[in-house]
Amino acid sequence: MADITTTELRQRLQAGETPNLIDVREPWEYEEGRIDTAQNIPLSSLPDKLDDLDAWKDQEVIVHCKSGARSSQAKAYLTQQGFTNVRNLLGGFTEYSAG
């Protein structure tokens, strides 16, 4: 699945959509600023949380971090685990919060 731009995500959130968002940054980063509907699961904790995310396997899941590097790893990992529609937020939270 193609990645998602910050513009597209912002438009969808403003339209009232609630996509499955995972923020893979560390808790302290999440506390400094976040996308309201995002669930914080640090990249290192993702393997331990797979059971909690099982219902999302065939749904769109958007992952993001600060710039896109960790979320690229998260996208690859989730895809390897059988998730069928994982999208990375291009530019990450840095670009999202600048818009």
Image (cartoon, helix red, strand yellow):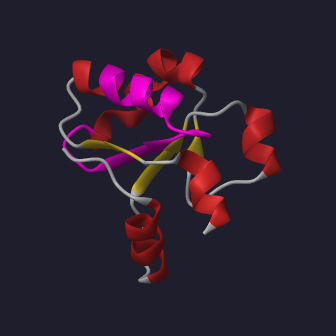
Asked if residue 41 is positioned above or below residue 33 in the image, the reply reads above
Span of residues in magenta: 57-77
Give me the residue at 49% from left, 22% from top.
46
Asked if residue 12 is positioned above or below residue 72 in the image, the reply reads below
Give me the residue at 42% from left, 77% from top.
11
Q: Quadrant of residue 41?
A: top right
Q: Position of residue 72 (x, y in %)?
A: 41, 30
The quadrant of the picture occupied by the C terminus is bottom right
Q: Quadrant of residue 80?
A: top left
Q: Is residue 7 left or right of residue 44?
A: left
Q: Is residue 26 left or right of residue 13?
A: right
The quadrant of the picture occupied by the N terminus is top left
Q: Quadrant of residue 36?
A: bottom right
Asked if residue 36 is positioned above or below residue 31 in the image, the reply reads below
Give me the residue at 17% from left, 37% from top.
84
The one nearer the camera, 54 or 87, is 87
The one nearer the camera, 17 or 95, is 95
User: Magenta segment: does it hold 45?
Assistant: no
Q: Is residue 1 left or right of residue 32?
A: left
The one nearer the camera, 50 or 67, is 67
